[in-house]
Amino acid sequence: MSDAPTLAQQASLLAQSGDDAAASSLYEQGLERFPGDARFANSAGNFHARAGRDAQALELFERALALEPELEEAAINAAIVLLKMDQPARAAQLLAQHEAGSTRSARYWTIRANAERQAAQFEWASNHYARALSLDPDNAKALAGQARLALERGLDSAVADYELALSRASGDAQLFHDYIQALSAAGRHSEALECSDALVRQLPMWVQGLALHAEMRWGAGERGDFTSHFAQAAKEDITPDLYLAWAAALSGVDRQSEAAEVLAQASSQWPDSEPIALSRAIALGEAGQGAEAEAIFAQFAKGSLPEWPVSRARNLLRIGRIQEAEHLLAAIVDPKMVDISAWALIDVCWRLLGDPRHEWLHGQPGLVREVALPVSEGVFASIRECLLELHRSSFMPIGQSVKQGSQTKGALFARIEPELARLKHALEDVLAEYRTGLPPFDPTHPLLAHREYPWAITGSWSIRLQGQGRHATHIHPRGLLSSACYFEVPEQVDLESRPGWLELGRPPRELVGGLEPLKAIRPKPGFCALFPSTLFHGTRPITEGDRMTVAFDVTASTAR
């Protein structure tokens, strides 16, 4: 009869040979025969983690730790799986609980710092990257993590940190990719463009590099064929992901017809590909070819991708089949697992159908409010100057709502500037005041169902329009609550045409015509507009002056 280590080795060899079923069966036998063996449970967890069965792997790593709390390998493995599951705070907490006995392990400190960085525990992450590097100065992963932290926090050392990391891992494409972003963030746009060009020449089929080069070309002011390198790459080799990224770059700057043409080429190569069919149908619809889009949606009516129902409902609205769209959306809206896009679209259906649930969803008093920012004039001015400095190295991004303007990159409140920390604290006070004016808890409402849970500011960014520009009508699908906090407002806001005003509830005109905004808000410096993320929103264009805002999303701890 085999002992536990021998059985684990046999199962591992089966897994390496590609016989997943036999390896799984052998691990199951071992777990029954050796229920108290922590190392066997850890080995079984590694097997399931490599196969992508994260929940099963995590259960086994936790079992190993329950049997042998000091088993560092199981703690690290559990943390790695938690990071894959997008639970960095839980990973950091688990590793903190198993610090004893791991203080001399650079790997432990690196993974813990990675978890803390992703959980926005920035000071801890900085300290623990330093600790890892004190144990192993050439640790490539710790150097890369330290550089990433510097980039996310807006530190002046980011470029140098990446250069140091690259000196230890010169062939790491992802590291070079992020180095280009650091150059761009530092305002060294010509160098960033040169490096992204070198990246696509070196790795012409790496889709992530191709997408970055498109972003750098667009940021450098190219408005012609800024995606020509995708076409060149397609001559060498073709993959579905290449065409999807190519089309995404074009769609991201409102060139939907061109994106549809690219996806038509892809569809001829992979006619049964659901991702390509979905992307093509979306592009056709946004390009005004709703009937052609619906033909594709109908062909893939039983598609397995979760985006199908909402995307098809949006197109059904576009072609006037409102009842069908409402029926499709009604089957998927859920206040516990909030799909912002589905709720936004079903509200449009209810308005068009005269359904009173529209008033329940968006018409209740207190859902839309303007709250003054609780800071002194001096602090407000210092925050404004900080934002202006950031915009000097920012440009108009791909795939965002801003049209003719600049937008800061990355999470604004991850940065180290003290002015931004003061702003975040002030906005947390604004949120507390907003919450007091909300209608009562309602378990069926997508926002009010989360009224009593802890809220947190997640995504954050700043947008500046200079002389002209607007925000296209859009929603923020990652938050329960959306916002606009004003730092610059053009004088022309008081004109009769209301340039620069925020419009809430007007769907995109190319989606549904004839619906007016539910509310229009005149922007005022020092005030913050707050509203449910399920409301479509955009701005009226300006033609002169400056309009600068900070926007952020708010999530509840239960909203996952």
Image: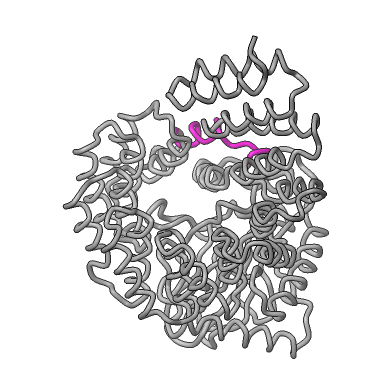
Q: Residue at x 34, y 57 (%)?
A: 251
Q: Does the segment drawn in magenta span residue 334?
A: yes
Is 426 or 165 nearer to us in this picture?
A: 165
Q: How many labels, in total?
A: 0
Q: Does the segment drawn in magenta span residue 259?
A: no
- Placement of the N terminus among the 4 image quadrants: top right
Q: Residue at x 75, y 89 (%)?
A: 377
Q: Is residue 238 left or right of residue 14?
A: left
Q: State the image quarter where residue 355 is shown.
A: top right
The x, y position of residue 328, in whole percent, is 48, 32
Is 107 or 547 nearer to us in this picture?
A: 107
Q: Is residue 257 above or below residue 383?
A: above
Mark yes or no: residue 554 visible: no
The x, y position of residue 233, in whole percent, is 22, 55
Q: State the image quarter where residue 293 is shown.
A: top left
Q: Is residue 382 left or right of residue 54?
A: right
The x, y position of residue 96, in whole percent, is 79, 51
Q: Is residue 135 above or below residue 290?
A: below
Q: Is residue 102 above or below residue 40?
A: below
Q: Which residues are magenta?
A: 324-337
The x, y position of residue 523, in whole percent, is 61, 76
Colour pattern: one colour
- Placement of the C terminus among the 4 image quadrants: top right
- Furthest toward the left, the residue is 235
Mark yes or no: residue 314 visible: yes
Is 115 or 41 nearer to us in this picture?
A: 41
Q: Is residue 15 left or right of residue 64?
A: left
Q: Residue at x 76, y 42 (%)?
A: 442
Q: Is residue 49 above or below residue 122?
A: above
Q: Is residue 222 left or right of residue 25?
A: left
